[in-house]
């Protein structure tokens, strides 16, 4: 790692960190106003908790010496002791630890959208720490360390399996464990702030260039390929989503545009340095259509995935991971995808046959099954002990006031024993009652 590459990776790390506030806005705009702070806090809480766990022991589990190809371990990595050595190679030291920390944080935060409006904050934080320890850190080792998925030949440049399929499967498990929101799907639960949603999608797209292009670990042509494909596929996915909306519903919506952007970003993530422009266009457009169709599955199957984490991240991650088997182009030959100078194989449409299908499908399904089972068990354990879901009264009244003693929008001000403005909060009404 020369100074230029080191600088690019540090910038990429900051870009990925910016994605978490972007995700908070994206999710926060889609929930009802009475629970927006809770959703923002679930994302920001992941930043604090996983940031600490990663530097204490998470990096060692993900990138330490392999134990049976299942997880890593290195006592020198506790507290990043070895990585803080000023004489260490920055590629294997603090720079790498910083970059990969951001992936761990956002993967956990992604899950929160599936249980919006009904989860206790403390229970969420307990789940987040346990799931990161038992699932994300080992799965990162499987994919990018010396684990079994990487050894099998599964291609995942920036996180289709380790991030999106992983988070999407956990989101599905938690949505099932916590059950449906009160009134869903009979009552409309529309986004309370669509400008927030579009702002969040824009911040995610911006930060995602660091997510994907930074995964080249160099400021070189491979990063350029990943960068351009991240732009191309995302644009195509947005158009695909909007086209489906227009044909199916007669309208193209802002929520659809923002969701299409995220679907394209998810799908191109595992493939961004393995496909050419035509592959990126195809993956993005297909993902935009399939994810738009997939979000309606929750109504047919009866699980309440509040903000469509399953439809966008699980399905989008599966699409991108499997499409590599069709569209991989060996002529690109990114250095990050080769072993001892050997080219990675081309996909079916580029003359490589079907050799990539087994590793891509097995890798995707392996992560999905493991994450789903462990997330379900953790969710059930927490729910049966300290409780995971808020009471029905809290859910109806508004989770923000009870869990955080705050409201997002002060629509009324208590003056002289009366609440002015459009409405008074329950807390204000209680205060007024006690005075009288």
Image (cartoon, rainbow, N blue to C red):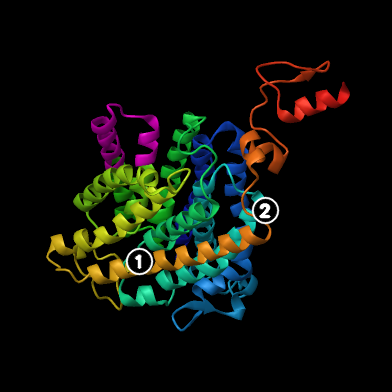
Question: Number of labelled discs?
Answer: 2
Q: Would you place residue 392 above or below residue 212 in this image?
A: above
Residue 298 visible to an observer of this rendering: yes
Residue 190 visible to an observer of this rendering: no
| Image point (46%, 43%), residue name | 307
SS state under label 1 = helix
Of 45 and 17, nearer the camera is: 45
Majority secondary structure of the magenta segment?
A: helix
Of 253 and 274, nearer the camera is: 253
Part of the protein shown in magenta: 236-260
Drawn side of residue 47 relative to residue 370, left or right:
right
| Image point (48%, 32%), residue name | 187
- Residue at the left extreme of this rendering: 351
CA gap between label 1 and label 2 equals 31 Å
Q: Is residue 90 magenta?
A: no
Residue at the spot of label 1: 365
What percent of the width, then of the height, locates residue 376? 51, 62
Drawn side of residue 142 relative to residue 415, left or right:
left
| Image point (67%, 33%), residue name | 407
Disc 1 residue crowd, few under 14, some 14–19, many 20+, Cα 10 Å:
some
Residue at the spot of label 2: 122
SS state under label 2 = helix
What percent of the width, then of the height, locates residue 325? 22, 63
The quadrant in which the N terminus is found is bottom left
Of 367 and 266, nearer the camera is: 367
């Amino acid at each position: 790692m020369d100074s230029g590459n080191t600088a690019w990776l540090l910038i990429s790390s900051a870009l990925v960190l910016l994605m978490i506030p972007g995700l908070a806005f994206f999710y926060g705009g889609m929930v009802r106003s009475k629970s927006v702070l809770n959703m923002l806090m679930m994302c920001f809480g992941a930043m604090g908790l996983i940031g600490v766990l990663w530097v204490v022991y998470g990096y060692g589990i993900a990138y330490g010496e392999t134990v049976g190809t299942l997880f890593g371990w290195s006592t020198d990595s506790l507290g990043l002791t070895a990585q803080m050595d000023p004489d260490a190679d920055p590629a294997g030291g603090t720079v790498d630890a910083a970059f990969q920390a951001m992936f761990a944080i956002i993967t956990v935060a992604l899950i929160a959208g599936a249980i919006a409006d009904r989860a206790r904050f403390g229970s969420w934080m307990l789940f987040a720490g346990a799931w990161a320890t038992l699932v994300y850190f080992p799965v990162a080792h499987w994919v990018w360390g010396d684990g079994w998925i990487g050894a099998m030949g599964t291609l995942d440049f920036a996180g289709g399996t380790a991030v999106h399929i992983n988070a999407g499967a956990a989101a599905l498990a938690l949505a099932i464990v916590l059950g449906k929101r009160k009134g869903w799907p009979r009552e409309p639960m529309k986004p309370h702030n669509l400008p927030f949603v579009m702002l969040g999608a824009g911040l995610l797209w911006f930060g995602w260039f660091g997510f994907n292009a930074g995964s080249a670990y160099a400021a070189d042509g491979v990063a350029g390929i990943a960068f351009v494909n991240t732009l191309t596929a995302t644009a195509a996915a947005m158009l695909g989503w909007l086209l489906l909306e227009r044909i199916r519903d007669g309208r193209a919506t802002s929520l659809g545009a923002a969701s299409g952007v995220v679907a394209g970003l998810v799908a191109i993530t595992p493939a961004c340095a393995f496909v050419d422009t035509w592959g990126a266009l195809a993956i993005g457009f297909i993902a935009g259509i399939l994810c738009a169709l997939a979000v309606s599955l929750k109504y047919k199957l009866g699980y309440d995935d509040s903000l469509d984490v399953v439809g966008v991240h699980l399905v989008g991650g599966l699409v991108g991971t499997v499409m590599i088997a069709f569209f991989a182009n060996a002529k690109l030959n990114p250095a990050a995808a080769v072993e001892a100078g050997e080219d990675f194989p081309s996909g079916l449409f580029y003359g490589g046959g079907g050799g990539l299908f087994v590793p891509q499908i097995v890798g995707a399904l392996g992560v999905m099954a493991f994450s789903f089972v462990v997330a379900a068990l953790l969710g059930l354990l927490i729910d049966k002990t300290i409780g995971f879901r808020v009471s029905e009264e809290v859910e109806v009244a508004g989770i923000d006031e009870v869990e955080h003693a705050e409201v997002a929008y002060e629509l009324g001000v208590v003056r002289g024993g009366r609440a002015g403005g459009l409405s008074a909060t329950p807390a204000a009404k209680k205060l007024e009652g006690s005075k009288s």
